Amino acid sequence: MNAKIILLPGDGIGPEVVAEAVRVLSAVATHGGHNLKFTERLMGGCSIDRYGVALTDEVLADCQASDAVFLGAVGGPKWDDPQAKVRPEQGLLALRKGLKVFANLRPVKVRSPLIDVSPLKRNRIEGVDILVVRELTGGLYFAQPKERSITPEGYERAVDTLEYYDYEVRRVADIAFRLASDRRKKVTSVDKANILESSRLWRQVTTAVAADYPGITLEHLLVDTASMRLLIAPRQFDVIVTDNMFGDILTDEAAVLAGSMGMLPSASLGASGPGLYEPIHGSAPDIAGKGIANPLATILSGAMLLRYSLKLNAEAEAIERAVDRTLEKGFRTADLLTAGERAVSTREMTEQVLHELE
Ligand code: NAD
């Protein structure tokens, strides 16, 4: 297997965790006789510093011509001025739109060695295995108009638009149902249909899609109820499908179940073309440059890349097993510490995953 992979390490801890995950991907590729060609490009704050924009047309074109895109994280205090015209996140949004990756898969798995890292009670979270499918190229993050103005009375006014088309809901719901077919056969669609018109469309379309999947149970939940149930009864969820903003917020909440933001990977997929793989966490400026970031979310994103873009399922599972064994043996980066353990560095954690892979 030959594959071209574009690396966008980005800012903060992005380059630290991407470098480690690439070592793991390279080890797996060498072992399996696969030729993965990695090409590094700038995106985010580092691209603003160099080119004045968060994502250049050339980098987007390189990504579009690749087999997969592997991203770290973007942003940081240096580019945080709310008045700024160019912002690192613009690169992320342009990349998602440019690659047409409308379905963002975020698995939330409570790994048994980490149960006590979560502040939630063991009996609540044991065995939790949720797949959140977040709509990624529509809704509040993209719809127009987005604007700021001053009213004739002198008030400052800001507008974001929440808009969904039926086809946008249908295609992401379809992916959620397909993924549920290989899991525990339940889809929970999360919306705010008691208030929002776009949510009423969301509910109508997901209900229609469910008719194509008679073996799968569909439940609808309001986002406020869903956010509470995620904490009090998380095992009741199998696949969750939801809109762009609800998915963003609910998965940060779900990271508490898994023990740390540093544990959650993601894959963003479209109907065809390269997938985009990245940890769900940000650039963590508070720990950047210290060599202590948890690389596992990025390493697990690498496993998703192998599974979804390169169809190397056995290799993906080998990485996931190596991560589990590393945790079972008690290796913990600082974000995963409970009382009395010694923290390992980003590099040491990866070394152990590589050791377990062997
Ligand atoms: P963050 O996810 O960067 O960090 C939140 C907390 O989790 C911090 O305490 C951080 O140290 C910790 N954390 C995150 N990843 C970790 C890891 N791998 N190992 C150990 N600890 C980890 O969120 P934030 O602090 O709200 O945002 C920081 C910057 O990242 C901002 O500029 C924000 O815009 C950006 N951001 C980028 C993305 C992305 O690139 N996809 C996503 C979210 C936030």
Image: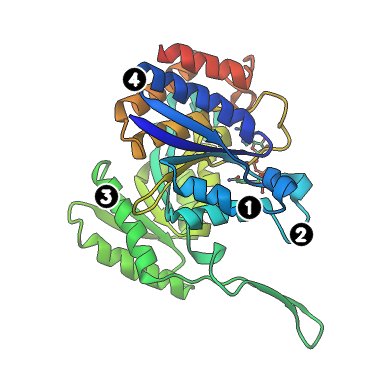
Q: Secondary structure at mark 4?
A: helix
Residue 277 locus on image (x, y percent): 47, 40
Pick whichever of labels 4 and 3 is earlier in the sequence: 4
Looking at the image, is mark 4 or mark 2 earlier in the sequence?
Answer: 4
Instruction: Give whichever of discs 2 and 1 has the lower sequence position.
Output: 2
- Depth-wise, is mark 3 or mark 2 nearer the camera? 2
Secondary structure under tag 3 reads helix
Ligand 1 under 8 Å from disc 3 Cβ: no
The answer to whether residue 330 is visible is: no
Q: Which residue is mark 4?
A: 32
Q: Which residue is mark 3?
A: 178
Circle nearer the viewer, 1 or 4? 4
Indicate which disc residue 84 carries.
Answer: 2
Residue 218 appears in the picture as rendered: yes
| Spatial separation of the CA atoms under disc 4 and disc 3 | 29 Å
Q: Nearer the viewer, residue 249 or 338?
A: 249
Question: At numbered mark 1, what does the secondary structure look like: helix, strand or loop?
Answer: helix
Report x, y in % for residue 224: 50, 59
Some atom of ligand 1 lies within 8 Å of the CB belonging to the residue at label 1: yes
Residue under label 1, please give it. 89
Q: What sort of colour scheme is used for the picture?
A: rainbow
**Circle 2 — which element?**
loop
Discs 1/3, front: 1
In this view, the mark in front (4 or 2): 4
Dot 1 and dot 3 residues touching (CB under 8 Å):
no
Label 2 CB less than 8 angstroms from ligand 1: no
